[in-house]
Image (cartoon, grey):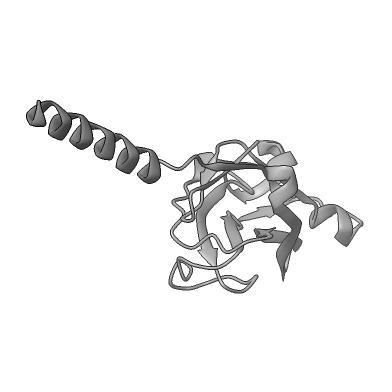
Amino acid sequence: MNRFFAKAALALSALMLFSCASTSKETVSADEAIVGVSVIGTIGMDGSKPRAIVVEYDRDLSGTKLDLSTFAVWDYGLSLSEKDLNSGKEAGKPLAVYLNEEPELSQKGGTKKGRYVIIEVNTDYSVGRYARSYKATMAAGVTQTNAVEHRERQLLRL
C-alpha cells in the first residue's frame, strides 16, 4: 500500500512540476507592439533613396531571431521598373535584417539586442528619371508577416 502512495505522490509531483514549467505565452499583436516605422535615407547623384527601414517596438527584443521573411517591405526602389534604371538591379530589395539598440545602421549587423529592427535595402542602382518630391523617394512601409518570438516568452504575431 505504501508503494501505491509513493507512486501516486511521485506522479502528482511530476504533474505539478510540468504545469509550473509550461507557462502559456502572452500573445501581443504586431499592431500593438510596433510603435513606429521610419526611413534612413541617402542622397546621391541620382537623388534620394531609402537605405534602411526602421521598425520600433514597445519592448526590448533581445534574443529574438529575425530573417528577411519576417517582414514584407515596400519602398520607392521597389516601385521602379527595369526600364527606369540606368544601372543596377533589384532596386530597393531588402538585403539584411537585424536588431539594434539605436535606430541607426550598423556596420557589424546590429547589437542583437534592443527594440529597433533595421531592414537594410539595396541602394546599388541609379535611375534615369528623378522624382520631384523627396517625400516620394523616401516613402517606405513594412508589414510583419511572421510571428516574432520574444525572449520573455511573448509571441508577437500579426
Relative image position of residue 47 (x, y in whole percent): 77, 63
Residue shown at the point (79%, 57%) measured from the top left: 138
Q: Residue furthest front?
A: 1
Image label count: 0
Q: Quadrant of residue 102?
A: bottom right
- Which of these two is toward me, 130 or 24? 24
Instruction: Look at the picture and state if 5 lies above or below 33.
Output: above
Relative image position of residue 81 (x, y in whole percent): 70, 36
Query: Is residue 84 something one can see in this rendering?
Result: no
- Which of these two is toward me, 4 or 127? 4
Q: Quadrant of residue 40?
A: bottom right
Instruction: Look at the picture and state if 8 lies above or below 92.
Output: above
Instruction: Look at the picture and state if 12 lies above or below 133.
Output: above
Q: Quadrant of residue 61?
A: bottom right
- Which of these two is toward me, 94 or 77? 94
Name the side, left or right, on which 54 lies relative to 63.
right
Residue shown at the point (48%, 63%) measured from the top left: 62
Query: Is residue 108 something one can see in this rendering?
Result: yes
Residue shown at the point (47%, 47%) measured from the top left: 67
Relative image position of residue 63 (x, y in whole percent): 43, 59
